[in-house]
Amino acid sequence: RKEVEQDPGPFNVPEGATVAFNCTYSNSASQSFFWYRQDCRKEPKLLMSVYSSGNEDGRFTAQLNRASQYISLLIRDSKLSDSATYLCVVTPSGGYNKLIFGAGTRLAVHP
Amino acid sequence: DARVTQTPRDKVTEMGQEVTMRCQPILGHNTVFWYRQTMMQGLELLAYFRNRAPLDDSGMPKDRFSAEMPDATLATLKIQPSEPRDSAVYFCASGLVEGGGYYNEQFFGPGTRLTVL
């Protein structure tokens, strides 16, 4: 079983739609959680950190459920520019900033 | 705008040849990571350094891969001899770790796209 699992998609949604991605992780001692975004043939970039209390950044909301060991990302009012692969990332306990990446969920927003 | 730089951006080589990839981390960052990305495996951590000292290279095939940081501005990843299964995009990332070692953002370079024929 992979340490971080995501639905690969693709999620094909129209502009303006709300879309949600989930991710599960296997190590209950994982410390930190993030969503990264990767555009086609580009490097990953940090989208947002995920806190136990949940956090919001504009149209993006991330939530963490430690009991169920899952992380979610909600995108409201999707834009064409949101089309990308979204990578779920965790750091293991004592991992000195080591990042474990999920395989990513591909999102395609169409007009 | 500080960025991680990587060279070369693209490399095509023949099986058995040595390949060297270079990375210049963001000035002032004390942690450097090497990742490999393929369609099948996604992003895998190969090795990382803190203050130029290797912390973990368990993700790297030891017989053919080596990673070093000759100085704070240069990290290298070598493959010798290269094999077709090494074809992938290799990313370098850097970050600044302070205090208790809690996570700070990692900044990725543009990657080296390696093709081994």
Image (cartoon, coloured by chain):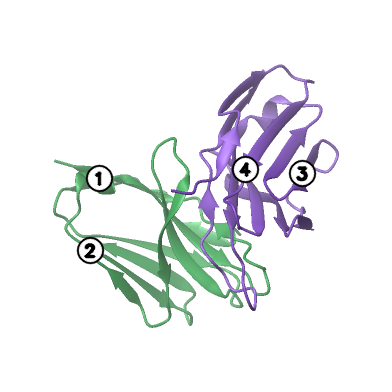
Residue at image coords 44%, 35%: A41
Q: CA distance from mark 2 to mark 3?
A: 40 Å
Residue A68 pos. (x, y %): 47, 78
Marker disc for residue A59: 2
Give the letter of the chain under mark 2: A
Q: CA distance from mark 4 to mark 1?
A: 29 Å
Circle 3 crowding by C-alpha within 10 Å: few under 14, some 14–19, many from 20? many
Residue A52 pos. (x, y %): 43, 81
Residues flagged by tags 1 and 2 on a common chain: yes
Circle 1 crowding by C-alpha within 10 Å: few under 14, some 14–19, many from 20? few
Circle 2 crowding by C-alpha within 10 Å: few under 14, some 14–19, many from 20? few
- Reading the image, the residue beneath label 1 is A81
- Reading the image, the residue beneath label 4 is B24
In the rendered image, which quarter is residue A96 located in? bottom right
Q: Colour of chain B?
A: purple
Give the letter of the chain under mark 4: B
- Reading the image, the residue beneath label 3 is B67
Residue A58 pos. (x, y %): 23, 65
Q: Looking at the image, which is closer to me, B15 or B28?
A: B28
Of marks 4 and 3, the one in the foreground: 4
Q: CA distance from mark 4 to mark 3?
A: 13 Å
Marker disc for residue B75: none
Residue at image coords 73%, 27%: B19
The amino acid marked with disc number 1 is Ser
The amino acid marked with disc number 3 is Ala
Residue A53 pos. (x, y %): 38, 83
Asked if the residue at tag 2 contacts the one at tag 4, i.e. Cβ–Cβ closer than 8 Å, the answer is: no
